[in-house]
Image: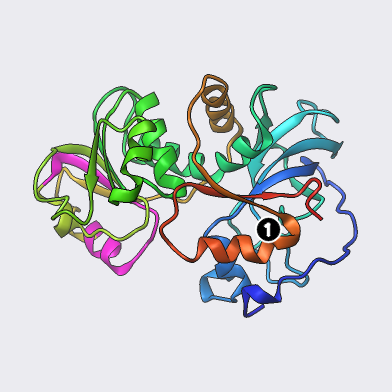
Amino acid sequence: IGSISHLRVMDVPMPEPGAGQVRVVVHCAAVNPADPKMLEGQFIARFLHSTKLPMIPGYDVAGVVDAVGAGVSDLAVGDRVFGHQQYASATVHGTFAEATVIDANAVAKLPDDVAFATAAAATTAAMTALQSLRDIGGLSSGGRVLVVGAAGGVGTLAVAIAKRLGAHVTAICNARTAEMVSKLGADVVLDRSAGDPYASGGPYDVIFDTPGVCTLGQVSAVLAADGTLVTTMPTMAFAAAKLATLLSRRSVGFVNVKSKRADLALVGGWLADGMPVAIEARFPVRDGAKAIAALTTGGRTGRIIVDVAGGW
């Protein structure tokens, strides 16, 4: 712990599923912002993953069930599944491994025509976007949405999912990624460097701040009178915004993403139906440190995939 460069390939005992769990042979995983935090030993890491050594990074998983624990009757050996480990101090089994043990209700069956890489890219990011827009933002059918950081891993899925929920989507990104974001389905694409993207437009029913950089004051002019600002980062600005909206029809929310089978099944159906997923790069698992380092450089245009099967 202390540096991404400390990541090494090593042999550990094969995990066995307990009651209510399954063991998944990992085909593909994906890199998340939690991975460098965990490996660098940041304070928040203790709430994201067990600190017991050896620490295996990785949360997203797509693969094949090869063992089931007691009480699991709705999944069987040989099922193609996808999902993600929960961000929690009790999480032990990372997904940058040949196999990982995971709660059975945290994975769903993967449609046969959806690739493992696509599924791994669409787990945590899609759950974050869906639960932010639908559950916190109240978006169910229609509405106007502003996605901040629309070219990132969560942002790209947020654009695609908001369109699936029937919304009119305005996306903020840089000029280099504007074309890609437009192809994901955004109705309007704003270049963040070409002036204040919050100076006009809206009113938006939901503003989804995927990188956690907005304040309520910044977006106040374009947030609807009963709109919701959703963030992925519980910052001091978020706490101030919660206080400021206590007596208002507006609201602010923080997403604490959960891997839920029903939500995964919904996303799996969308993937089978052609919902786009942006993948920026793929690394074999032996280059896991490089994959995680690539996440920290910024300017991403989608998810970073770790190929575990055949990647040693």
Location of residue 201 in the rendering, given as x and y in whole percent from the top left corner: 12, 40
When the figure is inspected, residue 92 is found, relative to residue 39, above or below; the finding is: above
Question: In the rendered structure, does residue 59 fall within the stretch colored magenta?
Answer: no
Location of residue 174 in the rendering, given as x and y in whole percent from the top left corner: 29, 52
Tell me which residue sits at (38%, 47%) in the image: 151
Tell me which residue sits at (17%, 50%) in the image: 197
Report helix, strand or loop for mark 1.
Answer: loop
Dot 1, crowdedness within 10 Å: few (<14), some or many (≥20)?
A: some
Q: Is residue 135 shown left or right of residue 229?
A: right
Tell me which residue sits at (74%, 71%) in the image: 52
Tell me which residue sits at (61%, 32%) in the image: 261
Camera-side residue: 18 or 186?
A: 186
When the figure is inspected, residue 240 is found, relative to residue 194, above or below; the finding is: below
Residue lying farthest bottom?
2
Location of residue 182 in the rendering, given as x and y in whole percent from the top left corner: 32, 34
Residue lying farthest top?
273
Pointer 1 residue: 91
The range drawn in magenta is 222-242
Location of residue 244 in the rendering, given as x and y in whole percent from the top left corner: 17, 58
Residue 48 appears in view = no
Camera-side residue: 243 or 85?
A: 85
